[in-house]
Image: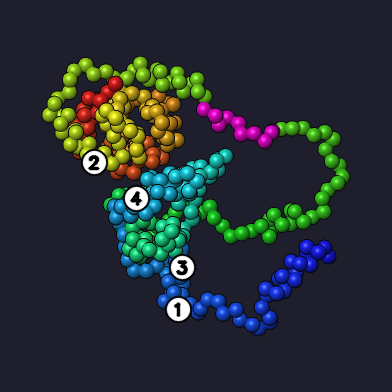
């Protein structure tokens, strides 16, 4: 043994307590401390506390406690986990595993939020607040409507989309036998043929086709032939107040949670410089989407129906006159 290893061994022996000797560190956990952590919820709802929480309350809590890491619409900030979207991506080359696309049980959501969230203040949410945040996560993933309330009574009725894709681990009966038999070393193939290479193919967008689609769409964009009704514009300015938390208009406007809307009227979609759009709207933009009055009206009616996969959590504007007024107001900022 080298002199260095002998020195380390001697130091460890000096630092180690004798058999049966107590170091006198720490204390016994209090019953209430054990109770605070002795909590789990089963997929069938057993273990849930009595309580309830609605989507709109959950939105407020999420913005206050969760959005700084997971993004305003569950899209994530930096390298923090994405919690919304990803539907239909699990069989692709870049699966997006979220609450809505991957998690098999809603109980996992409730249990994890209750136990570990928000980051740095785990356990600070009440039972009702956890129900509300869980309800909002369901809403972000298009699994419930904006007026939904989650409670211990209806919890077990909600089935997650990917639940059926999970099954008991069967590797001991499938993979293990295949990898423990003696390898065949006879009648090997005479020649080796390379059929594919380790490269991701056909995932880079065709920039030329996308540019041509945008240019063609711009040529078909509507133009303002007459000044809009001043009263309608004033009504639209008032209605736009419900959009101002995410979108800005006018001189000096900057991107926020949503893109600046200067020049959006009559323009090809997803064109604001410096804003990180969702893959859903980028795909539609590359297909030639232009924000005509008709398209704006359809989008404002119910964004998630018009554009599945959008990060915009706004439920929609139900009154036709409000939509017409906002469109008229946006037209005054057309470029």
Q: Residue at x 64, y 82 (%)?
A: 21
Q: Is residue 244 left or right of residue 40?
A: left
* CA distance for labels 4 and 1: 34 Å
* CA distance for labels 2 and 4: 16 Å
Depth check, mark 4 against mark 1: the one in front is 1
* CA distance for labels 3 and 4: 26 Å
Q: Which residue is disc 4 drawn over? A: 63
Q: Which residue is disc 1 drawn over? A: 30
Q: Which residue is disc 3 drawn over? A: 40
Dot placed on the residue nearer the N-terminal end, 4 or 1? 1
Residue 253 lies in what quarter of the image? top left
* CA distance for labels 2 and 3: 39 Å
State which region is magenta.
Answer: 196-205
Q: Quadrant of the N terminus?
A: bottom right
Dot placed on the residue nearer the N-terminal end, 3 or 1? 1
Q: Which residue is drawn at 87% across and 45% down?
A: 186
Q: Which of 308 and 198 is in front in this view?
A: 198
* CA distance for labels 1 and 2: 49 Å
């Amino acid at each position: 043994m080298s002199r260095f290893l002998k020195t380390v061994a001697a130091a460890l022996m000096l630092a180690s307590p004798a058999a049966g000797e107590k170091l006198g560190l720490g204390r016994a956990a209090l019953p209430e401390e054990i109770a605070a952590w002795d909590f789990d919820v089963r997929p069938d709802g057993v273990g849930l506390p009595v309580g309830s929480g609605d989507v709109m309350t959950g939105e407020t809590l999420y913005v206050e406690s969760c959005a700084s890491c997971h993004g305003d619409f569950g899209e994530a900030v930096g390298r923090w986990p994405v919690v919304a979207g990803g539907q239909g991506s699990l069989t692709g080359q870049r699966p997006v595993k979220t609450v809505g696309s991957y998690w098999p049980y809603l109980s996992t959501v409730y249990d994890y939020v209750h136990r570990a969230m928000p980051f740095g203040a785990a356990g600070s949410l009440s039972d009702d607040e956890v129900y509300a945040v869980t309800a909002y996560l369901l809403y972000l993933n298009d699994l419930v409507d904006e007026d939904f309330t989650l409670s211990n009574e209806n919890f077990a009725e909600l089935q997650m989309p990917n639940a059926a894709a999970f099954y008991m681990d069967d590797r001991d009966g499938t993979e293990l036998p295949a990898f423990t038999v003696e390898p065949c070393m006879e009648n090997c193939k005479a020649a080796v043929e390379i059929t594919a290479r380790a490269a991701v193919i056909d995932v880079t967008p065709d920039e030329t086709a996308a540019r041509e689609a945008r240019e063609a769409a711009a040529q078909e964009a509507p133009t303002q032939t007459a000044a809009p009704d001043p009263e309608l514009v004033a009504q639209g300015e008032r209605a736009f107040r419900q959009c101002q938390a995410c979108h800005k208009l006018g001189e000096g406007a900057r991107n926020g949670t949503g893109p600046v809307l200067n020049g959006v009227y009559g323009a090809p979609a997803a064109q604001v410089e410096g804003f990180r759009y969702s893959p859903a709207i980028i795909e539609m933009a590359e297909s030639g989407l232009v924000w005509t009055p008709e398209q704006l009206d359809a989008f404002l009616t119910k964004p998630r129906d018009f554009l599945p996969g959008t990060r915009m959590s706004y439920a929609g504007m139900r009154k036709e006159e409000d939509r017409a007024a906002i469109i008229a107001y946006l037209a005054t900022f057309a470029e």
